[in-house]
Image (spheres, grey):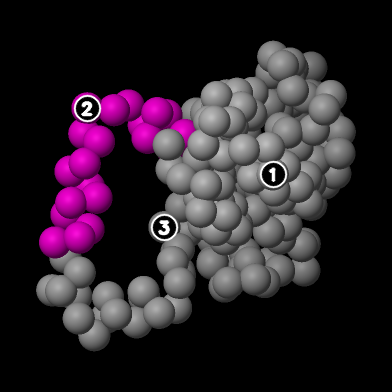
Amino acid sequence: MSDALDYLLKVRPEALQSYFDFIKKSGKHLDKKTKAIISVITKVDNQTENGFKQYLVRALQAGVTPDEIIDALFVAFPTLGLSKIIWATEIILKLDIPEFRIEQIGQAGKWYKIGELDSLKDGITHLEVHDRELFVYREGETISIYDSHCPHQVTNIPALAIKNNIMSCPKHGWKFDIRTGECIENGDRPLKQYKTKIEDNMLLAYW
């Protein structure tokens, strides 16, 4: 959300309420993935970079795959044209979202070894596994693994950005409780969390 829109929402909330009510009610017959894809294409058509980044992340969180996003860009070719598709692709490449890397496109998810359970101490551990930066939070038998990218505009959050179990994105100040992954300040979406399991004292994560 832009600073200007945030300001107007605070000083004239009643004036914008009807607009947001309309947005919420429109598309009620569409599933979440379809609505997310349409939002992404709209941002590409308008070439709104920050909006495209935000809705790209939202689409991935809604279950849209990178393959589906790329397909949608090409299906919308008649209205977008090649230049806008290239514009969107350049932004995706700069964001370096692991799921969009060439070796990942079209591949089914699988389990990856993260580390031996005995080597993971209680608290927070920052790791790089298979070209992905991860945060592992352990509290006894409870273990959670999060992607290092902020769900707002895919900013990579460094290990130094954590204090007292609170992770702060350096770009727009979104704050997350690393124990739960929930956003507790400035934002409204949680960190991406990976499925985990333990086999023969080895911690694994799925992506």
Q: Which amino acid does label 2 sit on?
A: His
Which residue does the numbered mark 2 point to in the structure image?
29
Q: In this view, does 37 lie above or below 75?
A: below
Q: Could you tell whether 89 is left or right of 175 in the image?
A: right
Q: x and y percent of residue 96 in the render?
A: 77, 46
Element at label 2: loop
Q: How far apart are marks 3 and 1 (CA)?
A: 32 Å
Q: Nearer the viewer, residue 32 or 156?
A: 32
Q: x and y percent of residue 54 in the render?
A: 53, 53
Q: Which of 101 and 177 is in front in this view?
A: 101
Which residue does the numbered mark 3 point to in the structure image?
188
Quarter of the image with the C terminus in it: top right
Q: In this view, does 181 lie above or below 111?
A: below
156 magenta-colored:
no
Is residue 130 among the parts visible in the rendering? Answer: yes
22 magenta-colored:
yes
Foreground disc of the pair 2, 3: 2
- Outermost residue on the bottom side: it is 11
